Image (tube, rainbow, N blue to C red):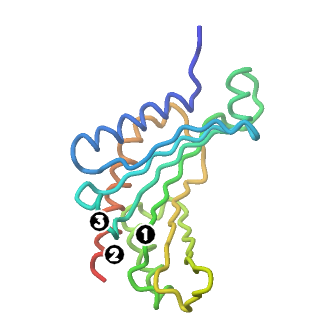
Amino acid sequence: MFHPLIFDNIRVVLEGAVYDRDFDGAITITGRSDVMDMATFQRLFQIEFKLAEQAAGEKAVRAQMQLRTSLGDIASEQLEQPLVEHVGCTICIHFHLQLPNPDDIPSEANKITTLLNEIWGQRPYITQTLSAKLPEHRIEWPPTVVTNRITLDFHRKIDEGNIDDLRELIEHTIQSLAGLQRHVDQT
């Protein structure tokens, strides 16, 4: 009989819990993918969403939850051999937004980090990646629009023992999404 991977079990629960919040009207799912990378034998599931009332908004902040597992984890589980220290998968959360005040990037980045640390209790490692689109033949500097990709990384693997924590993780993600949206809307 087929035994689903830890990744599959967590993916089903995560996806279902996010869809429950979509059905509740709190969020609108805007994308999802379930990928098997044949070059590296990795699995990736990601689901994207926005706050329901902001889904069509031009400045809507987008959340993306990513679940990953690697060849070592898959092989350890299937072969029942300890090929990795802890069999499981990783989850990280990304938020995508346009900086409301690109003229003061350090201040904006600090406000975002402070906001997220208040919600998450300084638990995940937070990085921010800034980018700007510079169209060919019309390079404007400084750019008028700066996009920020904020990543929350927990730097640990999860397994089926963490399934009960997924709903709380989703609620913290929605709370973060709402806080970031308020920040964008206030400036």
Name the residue at 55% across, 34% down: 159
Query: Do tag 1 and tag 2 residues touch (Cβ < 8 Å)?
Result: yes
What residue is pinned by disc 3? 57
Circle 2: residue type = Val
Looking at this view, name the residue that lies furthest to the top: 1
Q: Position of residue 136 (x, y in %)?
A: 62, 80
Name the residue at 29% across, 51% down: 27
Q: Position of residue 173 (x, y in %)?
A: 38, 55
What residue is pinned by disc 1? 97
- Residue situated in front as seen by the camera: 78 or 60: 60
N-term-proximal mark, 2 vs 3? 3
Looking at this view, name the residue that lies furthest to the front: 137
Q: Which mark is residue 184?
A: 2
Place residue 59 in its image quadrant: bottom left
Name the residue at 24% across, 50% down: 26
Secondary structure under the numbered disc 1 in the rendered image: strand
Q: CA distance from mark 3 to mark 1?
A: 12 Å
